[in-house]
Amino acid sequence: MTDRQHQEDVVTRLIRYCHLGPDHAEKLFNTLIAERRDRIELSGEEIELTREEIGEFVARYSAEVEPTLWESKRRKR
């Protein structure tokens, strides 16, 4: 597996986890970004992310997850 494939696999797992629900997404984002951590435990497995993976996560979170969070919040009103 190349570094690029590993990066996409890790980030894809994190994005899938975020799609489980708003609470999952916000907790994961806060842990990685707000708390500036590069390690997280997910499904009993500790995952360490590189700076590149964190950058990819932020980009994909903004494009793929955040819009669904806004949509979900609008429906509640």
Image: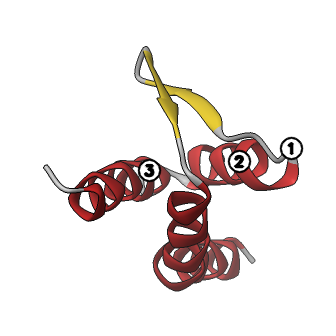
Q: Nearer the viewer, residue 4 or 34?
A: 4
The amino acid at mark 1 is Glu
Q: As rendered, which of 10 and 44 lies closer to the eye?
A: 10
Question: Does 47 sit above or below residue 60?
Answer: above
- In the rendered image, the quadrant that contains the C terminus is bottom right
Q: Quadrant of residue 12?
A: bottom left
> 35 left or right of 14?
right
Amino acid type assigned to the residue bearing label 3 in the image: Leu
Height in image: 53 above or below 73?
above
Residue at the spot x=86%, y=44% of the render?
35
Q: Position of residue 20 (x, y in %)?
A: 42, 48
Mark 2 and 1 residues: CB-CB less than 8 Å, in contact? yes
Q: What SS does tag 3 mark? A: helix
Q: Residue furthest front?
A: 2
* Quarter of the figure with residue 5: bottom left
Expressed as whole percent of the image width and height from the top left, the position of residue 7 reads 35, 57
Q: Which residue is mark 2?
A: 32
Mark 2–mark 3 CB contact (< 8 Å) = yes
Give the residue number, with chain letter if any, for mark 3: 14
**Proximity of marks 1 and 3: CB atoms separated by less than 8 Å:** no
> Alpha-carbon distance for marks 2 and 3?
11 Å
Please name the residue shown 27% across and 51% down the image. Answer: 6
Who comes first in sequence, dot 1 or dot 3?
Answer: 3
Q: Tell me the element at label 1.
A: loop
| Horizontal relation, residue 21 to residue 28: left or right | left
Residue that appears at 69% across and 73% down: 73
Number of other residues with Cα within 10 Å of mark 1, as a class: few under 14, some 14 to 19, many 20 or more? few
Q: Amino acid at mark 2?
A: Leu
The residue singled out by tag 1 in the image is 35
Q: Nearer the viewer, residue 37 or 62?
A: 37
Dot 2 or dot 3, earlier in sequence:
3
